[in-house]
Amino acid sequence: MHTHAADEQLLQVLKQIGVDFKKPREINFYFVFTTEFSAAAAARVLEQKKLSVEKFQIDPPWWKRLFVKPTWTLAVTRQMPLDEAKIKSITTVFQQVATAHNGSYDGWEANVAGEQLDESKLKNL
């Protein structure tokens, strides 16, 4: 099942604080996988879609390393405006890619540096 609840929640917060949705900006999308093999397979699929993908190994804390394996994270960065329909479409595709490769889509974040944000609304979040 594909859900857009997190997309809607983040978009709502960004609207509340006055982010300009028409301005192209850096948006980062994240995936988590339990094996490097799964992460690499998903990265190949994303690269076939002409996306730039970075793969990172996340080691567990030192006290867990005997019992817990590292996880693998993929990060996809795009320059684009905050278009609600486009974000939801990307989320659907990314959830499908993650699920097909035994991973999870971990959501997105938008760079709002340099924006004139309503600070009074930031305090109420």
Image: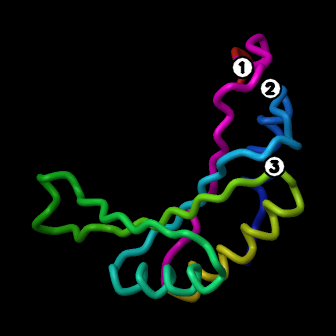
Q: Look at label 2 and name its amino acid.
A: Ile
Circles 1 and 2: CB distance less than 8 Å?
yes
SS at mark 1 in the image? helix
Q: Is residue 5 left or right of residue 54?
A: right
Q: How is the image coloured?
A: rainbow
In the rendered image, which residue does mark 2 sit on?
Answer: 17
Look at the numbered discs 3 and 2 and tell me whether their residues touch, using CB distance below 8 Å. Answer: no
Q: Which mark is residue 82?
A: 3
Q: Nearer the viewer, mark 3 or mark 2?
A: 3
Disc 3 versus disc 2: distance between alpha carbons?
14 Å
Q: Residue at x 37, y 69 (%)?
A: 72
Please provide percent x and percent y for residue 11: 80, 44
Which residues lie in the magenta part?
A: 102-122
Q: Is 38 placed left or right of 104 in the picture?
A: left
Which quadrant is home to the N terminus? bottom right
Task: Tell me the crowding category of disc 3: few under 14, some 14 to 19, or many 20 or more residues within 10 angstroms, Cα based.
Answer: many
Name the residue: 10% across, 67% down.
Answer: 66
User: Residue 7 at x, y = what percent?
Assistant: 76, 54
Q: Is residue 72 above or below residue 12?
A: below
Above/below status of 5 relative to 35: above
For the point 22% across and 67% down, which residue is it? 68
Query: Does the magenta portion include 6?
Result: no
- Residue type at mark 1 is Leu
Crowding at dot 2, Cα within 10 Å, few <14 / some 14-19 / many 20+, comes out as some
Query: Residue placed farthest to the top in the image?
Result: 120
Q: Tell me which label, 3 or 2, sits earlier in the chain.
A: 2
In the rendered structure, find residue 122 and report the number of the disc placed on it: 1
Q: Amino acid at mark 3?
A: Leu
Q: Are marks 3 and 1 in contact (CB under 8 Å)?
A: no
Res 120 quadrant in image? top right
Looking at the image, is mark 1 or mark 2 earlier in the sequence?
2
